[in-house]
Image (cartoon, grey):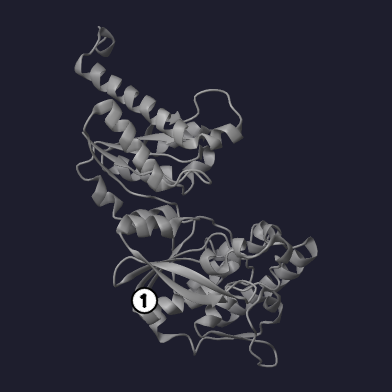
């Protein structure tokens, strides 16, 4: 029997790599010597680059770029091979880079993300995947595009810096200076939100407050975003509000698709493709996946859904081991997951569960594998219930 361990990290406690080690230890306790492989997995959000670099045996490339508030910061991205690179926009332009008392999306820029892309092009990469969650910005991706040669001009023809406050001043967009290497590169945008650029479900009204915008700031940013959208419509004949995910990362989804020709794809599907998950399923009998909490949201672009669906297509059984189960967790059964178990084995506080996360995960894995072994024994020695008259 061959196992494949492919779990998401348990945020704040266990890494994806740690779950592999604990699952292997538990499986050996129950089954003795086993054949297994493990692969770190993420869904395109936080930790995606770490998981993909670890899975592919890649390495890190460090460089200095512009942070969201124009400070110089050290950021890194992943090299998978001579052709492929994977970038998290949060590494340069993420919300965690800005202290709470300094968060202001009017002043923030995604310029550093563009610098990471430019550095990847300088290094010779032609297949670049970009995860765009966790941004501190609401600049429509202007900063990112500006770092790659796009110029945003005001009514007087003056070039704008590309911050959130510049959205309302954009009058024309000059793409003649766009880095020519962009057209020869494959750019994949990992995005699992479907927000348009503008409107009540757009970038500003959905995410602006968590980035430090007051209601007054949001009103100004939204008016600016509408102006920016209208300029794009007029010049390029493209409506960002018709692009699923255009409002992701403060509108970075718009810049990456409209100016750089990037293709929007599900984060988990992109990750599974990058690590050749389908190939890893060959010869596998059982996949074990999981996450910190499984609920209805797990069916929308998360690790368990992606892993379960890929396993089902290959005819491989998949089960889940999660920290806890929430509302409508059973919906994951419609996505290739045959069974779910939790690591928590008694009533306890969240603090205790987090503090004992490694111990509880291991004990939960042992229980899970013992159930699987019992099922295998039942299959070998069927009872009368297996063959009703």
Residue 195, image x, y percentages: 58, 59
> Is 37 left, or right, of 186 in this rendering?
left
Looking at the image, which is closer to me, 330 or 27? Answer: 27
Q: Residue pushed farthest right?
A: 216
Can residue 247 be seen here? The reply is: no
> Is 187 left, or right, of 75 in this rendering?
left
Can residue 187 be seen here? The reply is: yes
> Is 207 left, or right, of 282 in this rendering?
right
Quarter of the rendering occupied by the N terminus = top left
Q: Few, some or many C-alpha atoms within 10 Å of disc 1 (few <14, some 14-19, many ≥20)? A: some
Element on which disc 1 rests: loop
Please report the residue visible at 46 percent of the width from the left and 75 percent of the height from the top: 63
Please report the residue visible at 43 percent of the width from the left and 29 percent of the height from the top: 341
Quarter of the rendering occupied by the C terminus = top left
Give the quadrant of residue 370.
top left
Please report the residue visible at 35 percent of the width from the left and 42 percent of the height from the top: 20
Residue 389's place in the image compared with 176, above or below, is: above
Give the quadrant of residue 56.
bottom left
Give the quadrant of residue 189.
bottom left
Residue 48's place in the image compared with 381, above or below, is: below
Residue 14, image x, y percentages: 46, 43
> Is 199 left, or right, of 268 in this rendering?
right
Q: Which residue position holds label 1?
A: 185
Please report the residue visible at 30 percent of the width from the left and 32 percent of the height from the top: 27
Residue 309, image x, y percentages: 36, 43
Looking at the image, which is closer to me, 225 or 58? Answer: 58
Q: How many marks?
A: 1
Residue 328, image x, y percentages: 53, 33
Residue 263's place in the image compared with 301, above or below, is: below
Residue 274's place in the image compared with 258, above or below, is: above
């Amino acid at each position: 029997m061959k196992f494949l361990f492919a779990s998401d990290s348990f945020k704040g406690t266990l890494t994806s790599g740690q779950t592999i080690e604990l699952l292997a230890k538990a499986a050996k306790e129950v089954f003795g010597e086993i054949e297994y492989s493990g692969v770190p997995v993420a869904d395109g959000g936080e930790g995606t680059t770490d998981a993909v670099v670890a899975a592919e045996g890649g390495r890190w490339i460090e460089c200095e770029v512009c942070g969201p508030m124009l400070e110089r910061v050290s950021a890194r991205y992943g090299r998978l091979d001579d052709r492929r690179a994977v970038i998290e926009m949060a590494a340069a332009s993420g919300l965690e880079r800005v202290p709470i008392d300094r968060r202001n999306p009017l002043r923030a820029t995604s310029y550093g993300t563009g610098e990471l892309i430019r550095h990847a092009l300088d290094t010779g990469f032609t297949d670049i995947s970009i995860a765009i969650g966790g941004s501190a910005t609401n600049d429509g991706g202007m900063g990112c595009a500006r770092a790659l040669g796009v110029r945003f001009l005001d009514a007087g023809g003056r070039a704008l810096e590309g911050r959130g406050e510049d959205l309302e001043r954009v009058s024309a967009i000059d793409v003649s200076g766009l880095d020519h290497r962009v057209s020869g590169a494959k750019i994949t945008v990992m995005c699992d939100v479907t927000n348009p650029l503008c409107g009540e479900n757009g970038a500003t009204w959905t995410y602006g407050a968590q980035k430090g915008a007051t209601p007054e700031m949001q009103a100004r940013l939204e008016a600016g975003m509408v102006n920016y959208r209208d300029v794009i419509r007029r010049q390029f004949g493209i409506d960002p509000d018709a692009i699923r995910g255009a409002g992701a990362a403060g509108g970075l989804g718009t810049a990456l698709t409209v100016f750089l020709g990037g293709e929007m794809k599900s984060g988990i599907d992109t990750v599974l493709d990058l690590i050749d998950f389908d190939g890893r399923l060959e010869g596998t009998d059982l996949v074990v996946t999981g996450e910190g909490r499984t609920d209805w949201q797990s069916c929308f672009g998360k690790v368990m859904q992606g892993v379960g669906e890929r396993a089902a297509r290959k005819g491989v059984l998949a089960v889940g081991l999660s920290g806890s189960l929430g509302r409508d967790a059973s919906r994951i059964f419609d996505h290739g997951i045959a069974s779910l178990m939790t690591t928590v084995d008694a009533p306890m506080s969240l603090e205790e569960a987090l503090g004992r996360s490694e111990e509880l995960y291991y004990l939960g894995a042992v229980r899970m594998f013992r159930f699987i072994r019992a099922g295998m024994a039942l299959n070998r020695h069927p009872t009368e219930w297996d063959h009703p008259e």
